[in-house]
Amino acid sequence: MRDEGVIKFEYEHQREALPRESVADAICSLIAWREILALTGLVGQDRARYEGAGYGNVSVRLGRPGMGLGRRSFVITGTQTSGKHCIGLDDFCVVERYDFDTNRVVSRGLAQPSSESMTHGAVYDLGPQIRCVLHAHTPVLWNRRRELRLPETSAQVPYGTPEMAREVQRLYREGLFAERRVLAMGGHEDGIIAFGRSPEDAGQALLTWLARAYEQDCRPGAELCLR
């Protein structure tokens, strides 16, 4: 039985409308890239996949780069909004704090925090230069992760947990995640995480590695037909 989209942390959530003046600019760029991911099937909802649950989420940092660990606030798509064709401000929430030791998230917004909020927080804690995180689902790239030598979290570590957050940080310390800016989630079927200095930067990293995965299926003189 799959548990796609299930929130695995405790959270304190203040249900309130997000102020447009403080988040609108960041969200507009993020929505644009979320639309690209939706059009390419990297984010969405399909009755034939994952027992019909929505998959994929996106976030962007808010505030000053130098905020302390666990307090690098970010705006993220709300839980189970991946299947929506059009999203706006009300489909996001702000995660203000996250604590791996207590497995707790503090957030606000009309939408509840994504089940991957803890993992996004772990990526932002890797360095102040990281301003965007994209979580996509792509069988093509995930199945080619080893040929492409992508860093990979342990298959025994479930998504959305403090253990996953620590796995992400371990891979970054080992250097390969820092270099490639993309990792595969070994225990989360088709799950890929990419980061960058902006939504465009993170999106380019994700699409570049996806193109390299497709190259593995293409041989000289052969056709590569996407359906």
Image: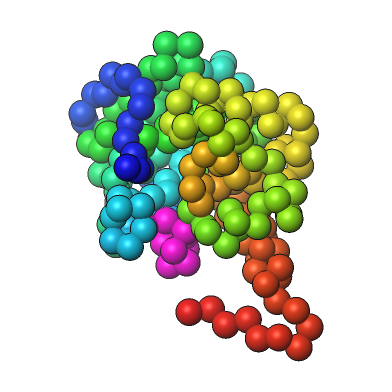
Outermost front residue: 1
Q: Looking at the image, can residue 21 be seen?
A: no
Q: Within the magenta stretch, is there residue 37? A: yes
Give the percent coordinates (x, y) of residue 110.
Answer: 22, 36
> Measured along the vertical axis of the image, is residue 140 above or below residue 100?
below
Q: Please tell me in which quadrant of the rendered image residue 153 appears.
A: top right
Where is residue 4? Give x, y as percent: 35, 43
Query: Can the viewer see residue 169 in this picture?
Result: yes
Q: Nearer the viewer, residue 117 or 30?
A: 117
Q: Which residues are magenta?
A: 36-44
Task: Please state, as top left, top right, bottom left or bottom right, where the N terminus lies in the image.
Answer: top left
Q: Nearer the viewer, residue 104 or 16?
A: 104
Q: Is residue 199 above or below residue 95?
A: below
Left or right: 36, with 154 as reference point? left
Q: Nearer the viewer, residue 89 or 59?
A: 59
Place of residue 173 in the rendered image (x, y in percent of width and height, measured from the top left): 73, 26
Check the image and name the residue furthest to the top. Answer: 102
Name the side, left or right, on which 175 lies relative to 193. right
Q: Is residue 53 left or right of residue 145?
A: left
Q: Residue at x 44, y 64 (%)?
A: 41
Q: How many marks?
A: 0
Q: Residue at x 21, y 30 (%)?
A: 16
Q: Position of residue 102 (x, y in %)?
A: 42, 11
